[in-house]
């Protein structure tokens, strides 16, 4: 699995086809808050916030053989000298999760992706609010 951090709106928009394909084949396909279009609407609505220098995209995409198997829609917020990773849309979104290809290895891959982004962004904290107990990310965090 090769991880990449998407940190610009241009790169985010380039993910649409991969995101929609992964989303439609994931366990989250019934969750509007995990869809590309939900994240696109949040980013467009709060574009000034995501471009103010205090907040930037930190979306992780994990690919195997060039095909997306994991998307972690995160942002990095800089607050009082602390780098915090949050779900995109926090605090207005009602639900946050990771979009992952279903399978036994998904919990391991989610854990590896979160460790990757924390290391690469030099984040001080990962705060995942409004994550349901049945979500993919909650399952991964409970296992790792």
Image: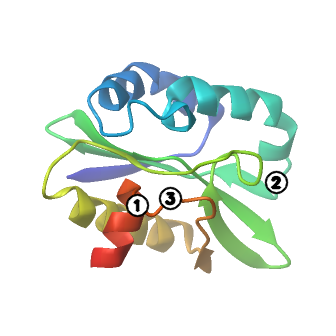
Q: Is residue 78 left or right of residue 100?
A: right
**Residue drawn 29% across and 36% down?**
26
Crowd around label 1: few <14 · some 14–19 · many ≥20 (10 Å) = many
Asked which quadrant contains residue 135, the reply is bottom left
Residue at the spot 31% in from the left edge and 31% down from the top edge: 22
User: At numbered mark 3, what does the secondary structure look like: helix, strand or loop?
Assistant: loop
Label 3: how many Cα within 10 Å (few below 14, some 14–19, many 20+): few
Above or below: residue 56 compared with residue 124? above
Secondary structure category for the residue under label 1: helix
Image height check: is 30 above or below 132? above
The quarter holding residue 110 reads bottom left
| Direction from residue 47 to residue 84 in the image, left or right | left
Which residue is labeled 2 in the image? 53
Which part of the image, by quadrant, shows the C terminus? bottom left
Q: Nearer the viewer, residue 31 or 43?
A: 31
The chosen color scheme is rainbow
The residue that mark 3 highlights is 132
Q: Position of residue 54 (x, y in %)?
A: 81, 59
Q: Is residue 21 visible?
A: yes
Residue 27: mark: none
The tag earlier along the polypeptide, 3 or 2, is 2
Please provide percent x and percent y for residue 93: 69, 45
Callout 2: helix, strand or loop? Answer: loop
- Relative to 56, is 11 on the left or the right? left
Q: CA distance from mark 3 to mark 1?
A: 9 Å
């Amino acid at each position: 699995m090769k991880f990449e951090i998407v940190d610009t709106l241009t790169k985010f928009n380039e993910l649409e086809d991969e995101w929609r394909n992964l989303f439609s084949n994931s366990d989250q396909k019934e969750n509007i808050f995990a869809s590309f279009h939900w994240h696109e609407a949040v980013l467009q609505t709060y574009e000034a916030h995501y471009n103010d220098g205090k907040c930037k995209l930190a979306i992780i995409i994990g690919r195997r053989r060039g095909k997306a198997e994991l998307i972690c829609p995160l942002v990095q917020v800089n607050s009082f000298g602390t780098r915090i990773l949050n779900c995109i849309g926090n605090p207005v979104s009602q639900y946050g999760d990771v979009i992952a290809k279903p399978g036994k290895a998904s919990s391991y891959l989610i854990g590896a992706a979160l460790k990757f982004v924390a290391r690469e962004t030099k984040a001080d904290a990962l705060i995942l609010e409004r994550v349901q107990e049945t979500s993919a990310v909650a399952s991964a965090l409970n296992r790792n």
